[in-house]
Image (cartoon, grey):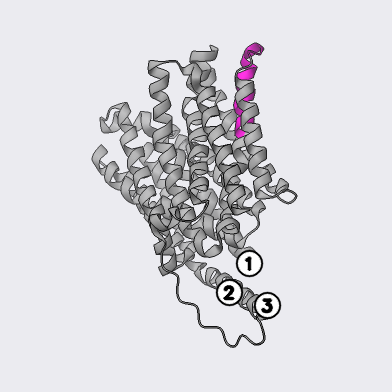
């Protein structure tokens, strides 16, 4: 039963990655069809991110009331409905409307599923699951490309992914008893451990009261929580800024041809995906903090390599690839270490705020560098990434001192 549920979660992570790259792949065609300016893609993206932040902050309350399985199933259902809505949208403003349930669903899944895996499974599974998400993000654009190349248009690209998400929703609903049995088994193990360690003369323990949602204020009051939240923001600032501006950096700072740069930025994505596959094996030997430090060291190495003027632009290519490898273990290992730092009773609330911080970093930090690139120079990209890396390292070591 445990292995069957794990298989369902693996499929869920692949499917959840499928829609994440669709907007970027389809927007050049969508903007023409809908008569929307190219820049308006940012409005859809920001609406999705805002919805994700809201649902991530509410995830503790929702998971306490309904359970991780139900929250995941309903959230995926919302995402599926939004994708189908995208496929029939007659204009840009309907897309904005559909982006609201899309974001709410995505945030609910992120927070509930990540925390569930962090509590119930080993670190290797967290790395491999996020690797599967990366596989999904690589497959999604190919599905959209198939629809476009066969003359079906971008709506069918969204429709195909929406139908897959509907199938995933049905699978999650069918699997709900597995989530409950997993929760019951964990509770029984905890009860046996408590009984074994209880003092014989202590008498019967009072029944534990249901935990109340912590809320944002409660999370921030926990010792070390601020540090892990800033770590998450810094990581997403590094990853998303490199993804958004890496290709432009190749062209404007290193003189790479535009067409070549558009394809070579894939080394960053492949670095993250392959790195997470490898990280799963490394976590069998190394702890989460050790893996985070390894990732930080590789990110630093990637930044340094980007600055080395090697022939045929190999420095920037290799630098982005190594940077991707460094990013690979950081995100999943931060999540997986959260229950061990703060306890299972607090982890859902903290993971929810982590997801919110992740999307704040995603929304604000890449555009901030865009202003720097426009008004100063894009050559500052490595230093910009380095600044967030230094802050992340400081926060991690401070967290270790407070919670180790």
Residue placed most toward the observer, 149 or 174 = 174
Marker disc for residue 197:
3
> Which residue lies most toward the right here?
285
Identify which residue is drawn at 60% across, 21% down.
306
Magenta segment: does it hold 316?
yes
- Quadrant in which the N terminus appears: bottom right
Q: Separation of disc 1 and disc 2 at Cα?
A: 15 Å
Residue placed most toward the observer, 331 or 155 = 331
Q: Position of residue 328 (x, y in %)?
A: 61, 40
Q: Nearer the viewer, mark 1 or mark 2?
A: 2
Q: Separation of disc 3 and disc 1 at Cα?
A: 27 Å
Q: Tell whether 12 sits left or right of 214.
A: right
Q: Secondary structure at mark 2?
A: helix
Q: Nearer the viewer, mark 3 or mark 1?
A: 3
Give the residue number, with chain letter if any, for mark 2: 187
Identify which residue is drawn at 53% across, 38% down.
235
Q: Position of residue 155 (x, y in %)?
A: 36, 41
Give the residue number, with chain letter if any, for mark 1: 2
Q: Which residues are magenta?
A: 309-324
From this viewpoint, is residue 257 visible? no
């Amino acid at each position: 039963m445990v292995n069957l549920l794990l298989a369902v979660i693996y499929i869920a992570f692949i499917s959840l990655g499928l829609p994440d790259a669709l907007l970027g792949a389809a927007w050049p065609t969508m903007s023409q069809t809908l008569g929307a300016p190219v820049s308006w893609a940012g409005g859809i993206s920001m609406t999705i991110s805002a919805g994700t932040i809201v649902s991530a902050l509410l995830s503790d309350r929702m998971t306490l009331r309904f359970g991780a399985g139900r929250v995941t199933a309903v959230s995926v259902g919302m995402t599926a409905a939004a994708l189908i809505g995208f496929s029939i949208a007659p204009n840009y403003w309907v897309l904005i409307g559909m982006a609201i349930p899309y974001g709410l669903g995505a945030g609910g899944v992120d927070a509930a599923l990540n925390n569930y895996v962090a509590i119930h499974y080993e670190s290797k599974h967290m790395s491999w699951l996020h690797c599967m998400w990366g596989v999904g993000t690589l497959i999604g654009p190919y599905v959209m490309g198939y629809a476009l190349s066969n003359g079906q248009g971008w709506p069918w690209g969204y429709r195909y992914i929406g139908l897959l998400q509907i199938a995933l929703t049905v699978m999650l609903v069918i699997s709900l008893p597995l989530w409950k049995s997993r929760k019951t088994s964990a509770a029984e193990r905890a009860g046996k451990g408590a009984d074994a360690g209880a003092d014989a003369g202590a008498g019967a323990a009072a029944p534990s009261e249901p935990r109340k949602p912590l809320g944002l204020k409660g999370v921030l009051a926990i010792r070390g929580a601020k540090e892990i939240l800033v770590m998450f923001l810094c990581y997403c600032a590094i990853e998303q800024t490199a993804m958004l501006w890496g290709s432009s950096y190749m062209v404007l700072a290193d003189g790479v041809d535009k067409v070549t740069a558009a394809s070579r930025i894939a080394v960053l994505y492949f670095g993250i995906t392959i790195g997470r596959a490898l990280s799963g094996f490394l976590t069998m030997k190394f702890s989460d903090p050790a893996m985070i430090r390894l990732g930080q060291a590789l990110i630093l190495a990637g930044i340094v390599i980007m600055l080395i003027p090697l022939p045929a632009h190999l420095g920037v290519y290799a630098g982005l690839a190594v940077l991707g490898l460094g990013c690979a273990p950081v995100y999943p290992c931060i999540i997986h270490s959260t229950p061990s730092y703060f306890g299972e009773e607090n982890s859902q609330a903290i993971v929810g705020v982590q997801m919110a911080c992740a999307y704040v970093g995603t929304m604000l930090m890449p555009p901030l560098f865009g202003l720097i690139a426009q008004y100063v120079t894009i050559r500052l990209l490595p230093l910009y990434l380095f600044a967030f890396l230094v802050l992340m390292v400081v926060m991690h070591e401070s967290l270790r001192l407070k919670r180790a």
